[in-house]
Image (tube, helix red, strand yellow):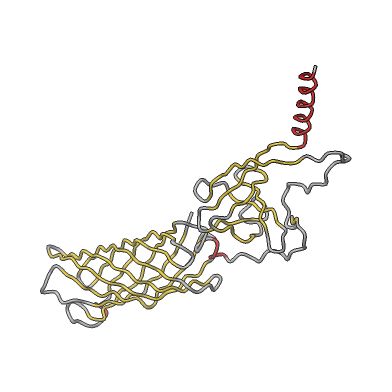
Amino acid sequence: MIKKYAAIVFLTFWMVGASAFAASYKYYIKIVAPAVPVYASASTSARALPAAKKDQLLEIVEKKDQWLRIKVTIAGGGFVYGWVEVSTTKYKIIKKTVIVEQPRDLPRKPSALAPLASTDNDVVGKTKTKPAAKRKTQDNEFRHGATYTYRAFLGPVYSIKDYFSSSGLSNFQYRFGIGVDRIINDKIWLSLPLMYAQGQGFKTLLGGINGYFAPLDLERWMPYAKLGGSFEYLFSGGNSFYGANVEAGLGVDYVLNDNIAFGIEPISIQAMVYRSEATIPMNIRGQLLLSVRFKW
């Protein structure tokens, strides 16, 4: 009889405990990219919220097509709902177990939950917050949002000191090429250019690596300094030789939108430091490059 009563008491306490606590799961995204754009609704044309930064952990509220609705904490203790595009590279999905205490001895009534459909004023918290600042286009895309961008460029190359010590317009070469940019952080990126030039009786194939440094945040304007090196193959008829150069330059990109930027590099010097043909003197060239930078 005692064992029977003990079992009943144990079962009663177990059921009460089970009703008081329930295990559930929440899903989060952990940002692994330098930054991820966040929008007020499920569209890239919607109002932009502050970008999610690397290592941030954000709760997922719902999934809609190729978008995730997330909960973003803001200054003052409140939070806003935002949307990010589904991605397999910009963040990781994390599942966490949550123990939720269920209320007892309280009257049940429908809870007044905000609708999940996102609006521009979808703000929940202890304090009323100011609208999110308008996103700087290049900060979220060409500085933060992209891992790789691409550049096409062209322009004249003029001799400051040339192979033949000649003068006049014959000193000009005409150069064009493409490059792949790898974004390191919001101030630094590396570029791998491949170029072709023609002039001065030579044709030139050139490839190299350049480092870009853009410390100033001027909204759509991105002034930068460039330092790099290149290797070139010059040929004309049966004559050819190799050369290596160091390069330095100053330029600026203007960001038109999230996908396109235009650039000009008016100050750019290319100095030869090695050539395979000893009879050819070292040369120093200047170049003015116009470029289009884009991403997809």
Residue in the foreground of this view, choosing between 234 and 119: 119
Q: Position of residue 291 (x, y in %)?
A: 42, 67
Total marks placed: 0
In the displayed image of the protein, which residue is found farthest to the top? 1
In the displayed image of the protein, which residue is found farthest to the right? 107
In the displayed image of the protein, which residue is found farthest to the left? 279
Q: Residue at x 25, y 75 (%)?
A: 271
Location of the N terminus by quadrant is: top right
Q: Position of residue 23 (x, y in %)?
A: 68, 37
Q: Residue at x 69, y 41 (%)?
A: 99
Q: Is residue 17 above or below residue 249?
A: above
Horizontal placement of 150 versus 41: left or right? Answer: left
Horizontal placement of 266 versus 77: left or right? Answer: left
Horizontal placement of 51 versus 250: left or right? Answer: right
Q: Position of residue 183 (x, y in %)?
A: 44, 61
Q: Residue at x 77, y 37 (%)?
A: 20
Q: Position of residue 295 (x, y in %)?
A: 47, 57
Q: Residue at x 75, y 41 (%)?
A: 101
